[in-house]
């Protein structure tokens, strides 16, 4: 900072010295203003990144950590129905069977409690039945296979039987034990050590880690035709949902890719997340239907039809609403939920197309929302430029919403 004496010295040096000083100060001011703008944008970016969690981004709930998130209002609307089973709901009640496995009778005292007469010879009738469904004693059944041989009385040759192909050891576990172990470990997601504890504590079978690992490998080999059929069924479907999530494998980050329909789900583990992994999986390269996803750039490289996942869009819109002062994110979110409700209502009524389920006034209301969202910040306005600078982290999400709205608005106008 210049002192008073330095400023006076410049003044006494003449007009050119004053102009040079002012120009230098203006350059320094411009540089400082740019630094402030850059740092402000960086702070905004870091704050936005810090405020992201599973409710306003594509991050999974597991990434939220142990900190309790603030309570947020659910997007679900009250249905007006009472809690519990609704009218017409097919509930389940345990019903008695006609032929129980075991019958236990409970007779009264052999002497009449009123007159003390013996009841030994009196006829007995069933007054009431109650059935208890119980598990049998859980203990393994040991099946011994004996190989028999016979000596021919004519030529003295010895003929022997053969063991089943799956009986190869003097003592081994059968397919039922292995199937239950794989089911508990894989489908019920019980860790290997706890699966071993279950077999030891409940069934008294000391199942080793190696036996369980071998059972998994055997099951995987036998399910290869099923896996191939699921993959082919997904690839031939009209609409398929695609997603991927990080997973740790041997201390390294891999990616678990999923392709699913209402009836089929196909999982594939890959070391990469992007297009190289999707090509290796082999569904998207030749897929002819509609791929629904979160607008990851790798998905958009394929020539099939694309649809954006509404759950991801709602989180993107939540992030845009929290980081900008615009009203269009809330409007489009409400529009998405309205369309979802209209689709459900149309499906319940047996209608094939959404527009047939929306009345003319509703279509007029939908038509006003894109115009209002566009006019909220006219192109080139100072407010729009300021918002673009302060909300840079949400630019990608906003572009995805805009692309979705363009695709949505075109058929509505038609």
Image (tube, helix red, strand yellow):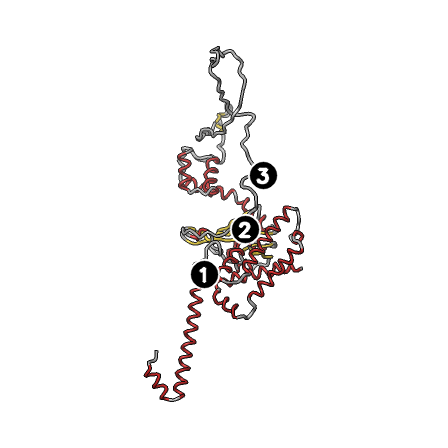
Residue that carries the numbered disc 3 in the rendered image: 89
Mark in front: 3 vs 2: 3
Quarter of the C terminus within the rendering: bottom right
Question: x, y (%) of residue 267?
Answer: 51, 49
| C-alpha separation, residue under disc 1 versus residue under disc 2 | 31 Å
Question: x, y (%) of residue 119?
Answer: 49, 12
Residue that carries the numbered disc 2 in the rendered image: 259
SS state under label 2: strand
Residue that carries the numbered disc 1 in the rendered image: 48
> Pointers 3 and 2 in contact (CB under 8 A)?
no
The front one of 410 and 117 is 117
Residue depicted at 49% across the width and 56% down the height: 56
Mark in front: 1 vs 2: 1
> Pointers 3 and 1 in contact (CB under 8 A)?
no
Is residue 344 in sight in this rendering? yes
Whether 118 is drawn above or below 249: the answer is above
Q: Residues within 10 Å of mark 2 (few under 14, many from 20)?
A: many
Q: Residues within 10 Å of mark 3 (few under 14, many from 20)?
A: few
Question: x, y (%) of residue 228?
Answer: 55, 47
The front one of 123 and 304 is 123
Q: Earlier in the sequence, mark 3 or mark 2?
A: 3
Question: x, y (%) of residue 218?
Answer: 48, 42
Q: Residues within 10 Å of mark 1 (few under 14, many from 20)?
A: some
Q: Earlier in the sequence, mark 1 or mark 2?
A: 1
Whether 27 is drawn above or below 123: the answer is below
The front one of 326 and 57 is 326
């Amino acid at each position: 900072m210049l002192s008073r004496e330095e400023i006076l010295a410049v003044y006494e040096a003449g007009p050119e010295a004053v102009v040079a000083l002012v120009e230098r100060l203006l350059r320094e001011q411009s540089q400082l203003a740019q630094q402030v703008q850059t740092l402000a944008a960086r702070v905004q970016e870091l704050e936005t990144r810090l405020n992201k969690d599973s409710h306003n981004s594509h991050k999974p709930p597991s990434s939220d950590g142990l900190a309790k998130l603030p309570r947020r209002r659910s997007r679900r609307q009250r249905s007006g129905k009472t809690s519990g089973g609704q009218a017409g709901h097919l509930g389940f009640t345990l019903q008695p069977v006609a032929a129980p496995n075991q019958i236990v009778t409970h007779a009264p005292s052999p002497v009449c409690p009123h007159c003390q007469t013996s009841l030994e010879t009196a006829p007995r009738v069933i007054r009431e039945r109650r059935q208890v469904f119980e598990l049998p004693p859980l203990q393994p059944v040991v099946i011994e296979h004996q190989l028999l041989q016979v000596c021919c009385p004519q030529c003295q040759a010895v003929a022997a039987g053969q063991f089943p192909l799956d009986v190869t050891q003097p003592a081994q576990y059968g397919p039922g034990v292995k199937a239950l172990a794989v089911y508990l470990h894989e489908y019920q997601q019980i860790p290997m050590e706890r699966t071993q504890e279950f077999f030891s504590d409940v069934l008294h079978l000391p199942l080793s880690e190696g036996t369980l690992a071998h059972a998994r490998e055997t099951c995987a080999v036998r399910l290869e035709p099923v896996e191939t059929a699921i993959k082919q069924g997904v690839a031939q479907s009209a609409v398929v949902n695609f997603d991927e999530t990080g997973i740790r494998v041997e201390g390294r980050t891999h990616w678990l890719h999923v392709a699913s329909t209402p009836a089929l789900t196909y999982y594939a583990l890959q070391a990469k997340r992007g297009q190289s992994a999707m090509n290796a999986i082999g569904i998207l390269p030749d897929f002819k239907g509609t791929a629904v996803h979160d607008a990851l750039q790798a998905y958009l490289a394929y020539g099939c039809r694309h649809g954006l996942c509404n759950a991801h869009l709602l989180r993107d819109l939540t992030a845009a609403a929290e980081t900008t002062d615009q009203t269009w994110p809330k409007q489009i979110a409400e529009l998405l939920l309205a369309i979802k409700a209209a689709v459900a209502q149309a499906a319940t009524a047996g209608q094939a197309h959404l527009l047939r389920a929306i009345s003319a006034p509703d279509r007029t209301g939908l038509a006003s929302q894109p115009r209002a969202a566009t006019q909220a910040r006219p192109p080139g306005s100072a407010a729009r430029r300021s918002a673009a600078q302060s909300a840079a982290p949400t630019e990608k999400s906003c572009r995805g919403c805009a692309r979705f709205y363009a695709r949505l608005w075109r058929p509505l106008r038609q």
